[in-house]
Amino acid sequence: MLSDCLAKEHQEGIAPDGQPFRIFTLTNAKGMKVQFMDWGATWISCQVPVGSEMREVLLGCQVNDYPKQQAYLGASIGRYANRIANSQFELNGKGYLLAANQNQHQLHGGQGFDRQRWYLEKCGGNSITFSHFSHDGDQGFPGNMHVFVTYSLSENNKVKIEYEAICDQDCPINLTNHAYFNLNNAVEGCDIRGHSLQLNADYFLPVDSAGIPNAELKSVEGTSFDFREEKPIGLDFLQEEQQLVKGYDHSFLLNQNDEKTCAILTALDRSLTMKVTTSQPALQVYTGNFLSATPNRQNGQYADYAGIALETQCLPDTPNHPEWWKYGGITKVGEKYYHWTKYQFIS
Ligand code: BGC
């Protein structure tokens, strides 16, 4: 344990490596309280003051259930978030075969960063940095890679996540956090389709029933994917391409604005809004279409659509689409990968 860690730390449960999970709590003067765990560098709780109530807005489970659940609740995802088709790609004329974990495809990096114990690198009063080393060949990816995730909480109720990585070979890198939000009730998880969503995106990426991109970027104009004006998530639900994947589970290419607000999510009763800004080029919107059977914090289970994941990242399967490399996805040897995402809660 670092003696100069200013965040509150406690230990709980037993992780698959036989050691307890280490949990760190950050708070601000407004009373907001967020918690992070070293296993998977996971965001495990986000309590926001709304009137006189402290409201949990992040889906989560009991600590011992984190390694078992299949939904990637709040986890840091890498090396490559989202899917790589047929678990293979070619880079610099060389073919790479990855560890498949969703039929023949690789999802979220295989036995990825969400399943590792991260090292506590730095810890201050309002921020905490975890690091992880991924060796050459890990899950089939080239190069030795050092990765850092920093969480901070500001006084204006903003949670910032920064991702930093460096690799000693050219490698696909796509880091994100798999937080699911429910701004009304993330404890039981009421149906997220009553929330409203606005996205700063003119294009989305159609996928097949396995979630693999199967067409070019498509304009949202005149489709159920048009969130350029705020609308209830349930309004155009299960229309068009959504039918293949039980709802929204699609990547949206973010418009390039200075401020880069990428998403605004608002609770059903409008008591709370979350504004997401990011340096990342795209956003995977996943409406929790297969959440059922995911454990919650109370010995129960969430239902489908109990939370929405807004995963900032680059486009899926980019290693197999050189035409999308301009949006990121491949990091050159020695080049620093750096991205940030901020989630601001306004009540
Ligand atoms: C993917 C979903 C997948 C989920 C796993 C999301 O990022 O887009 O297809 O089912 O992760 O929890």
Image: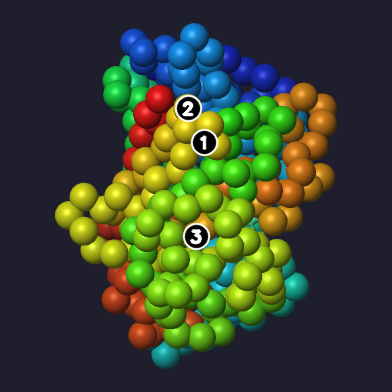
Q: Amino acid at mark 1?
A: Ala
* Residue carrying label 3: 284
Query: Is residue 194 visible in the rendered structure shown here?
Result: yes
How does the figure colour the protein chain or chains? rainbow
Q: Are marks 1 and 2 in contact (CB under 8 Å)?
A: yes
* Residue carrying label 1: 267
Indicate which disc residue 271 carries.
Answer: 2
How far separated are the C-alphas under marks 1 and 3? 20 Å
Q: Is mark 3 within 8 Å of ligand 1?
A: yes
Q: Is residue 155 left or right of residue 241?
A: left
Comes first in the chain, label 2 or label 3: 2
Q: Amino acid at mark 2?
A: Ser
Above or below residue 100? Residue 294 is above
**Image location (x, y in percent) of residue 49:** 46, 17
Crowd band around label 3 with a 10 angstrom C-alpha radius: few (<14), some (14–19), many (20+): many
In-front residue for pair 44/124:
44
